[in-house]
Amino acid sequence: MNDITTKAVLVKLSIGLPGNTRKDKRLTDEMTARHSLGAKAGRWLKQLYPQEALEPLTKLSGEARTFHYDHSLPWTDEGWRILPTAAHGDYTEKLRELRHQFEALSESHFIARLPEWTAWAMQAHNGTFNPEDYPPAGALRRKFSFSVDFQPIPSGSDFRVDLNSDDLASMEAQVNARVSDAIAAAQHDLWHRLATPLKAVVERLSQPEATFRDSLIGNLRDIVSLIPKLNLTGDTALESFRAVVAKSLASLAPQSLRDSSASRRDAAARAQDILNQMQDYMPRGNV
């Protein structure tokens, strides 16, 4: 097995926000009785704070998760992903920046304006307002969290247990097989991430009258810049296709494609040709 343990680590991004809904048992009971509903027909959920109270933090959390997924590769365990060491610097710098923004925003936008959000709730919920649903600032502050955890990729040679040689060898083989399968899946994911925007180029530019955003080409530029950092196994075929896409398609100007139907047809044909060739090199499955 390629000793991937020296080329990558596992990373996990965890972000927490205060919940913005709470079950109102009294209202649920009233609605159930008023309409003669079954005991499990439904429940009344109240919105604790106005949408704008948490909206910018929710948006920033989404930005962080998108960056996390774009700059890492899938791993077998839920929540953990593979981060190649080549991408570690850019990853940690960006996540540190986003964490600082998150912490500052939680204070300046939510905690500092808590009286405003609570006043909204008192008016919106009228006689059903329950002060117990609204903890003080100190308790709410603890509900905001933004953390990035790292751990080494496991290796069968890490076992240090008192077992007979056959059992130990079996355990090592299982761990190594699991890591090998995860790396193969990660590489397939990377091929798929190159194929997906190519398919979009074919679909949109093959239609003479179809409109498209600049992101049609921007997505190609993003993935061709990421592949060198995420190409964990040094897949030369993947790098070759990446270079072709970078030169022949990612360098195109979106507006020039809008202005020229011939350029659109040519770009769509080139993208389809690359996709056809990629079918012979994809690690598993087809493009």
Image (cartoon, helix red, strand yellow):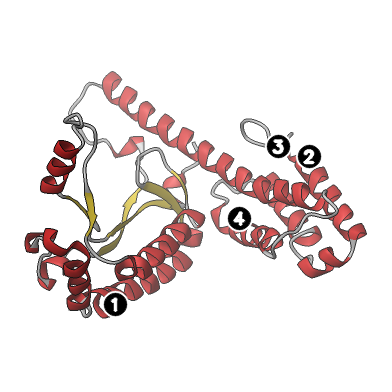
User: In front here: 139 or 67?
Assistant: 139
Query: Dot 1, crowdedness within 10 Å: few (<14), some or many (≥20)?
Result: some
Residue sitting nearer the eye, 127 or 274: 127
| Contact, mark 2 vs mark 3 (Cβ under 8 Å) | yes
The alpha-carbon separation of the residues under discs 1 and 4 comes to 37 Å
Q: Residues within 10 Å of mark 2 (few under 14, many from 20)?
A: few
Mark nearer the viewer, 1 or 4: 1
Residue at (67% x, 45% y) in the render: 195
The numbered mark, 2 or 4, whose residue comes first in the sequence reads 4
- Please name the residue that numbered disc 1 is placed on: 109
Q: Nearer the viewer, mark 1 or mark 2?
A: 1
Residue highlighted by disc 2: 277
Say which element carries label 3.
Answer: loop
Mark 3 burial class by Cα count in 10 Å: few <14, some 14-19, many 20+: some
Q: Secondary structure at mark 4?
A: helix
Which amino acid, mark 3? Tyr
First in sequence, mark 1 or 3: give its number: 1
User: What is the C-alpha distance between the residues marked 2 and 3?
Assistant: 8 Å
Q: Amino acid at mark 4?
A: Ile
Frontmost residue, 29 versus 266: 29
Real-space Cα distance between discs 3 and 4? 16 Å
> Which x, y percent locates residue 135?
10, 65
Residue at mark 4: 227
Residue 253 in sight here = no
* Residue depicted at x 26% and y 61%: 17
Residue kind at label 2, given as amino acid type: Gln
Amino acid type, residue under disc 1 in the picture: His
Q: Position of residue 2 (x, y in %)?
A: 50, 40
Disc 1 to disc 2: CB gap under 8 Å: no
- Residue picked out by circle 3: 281
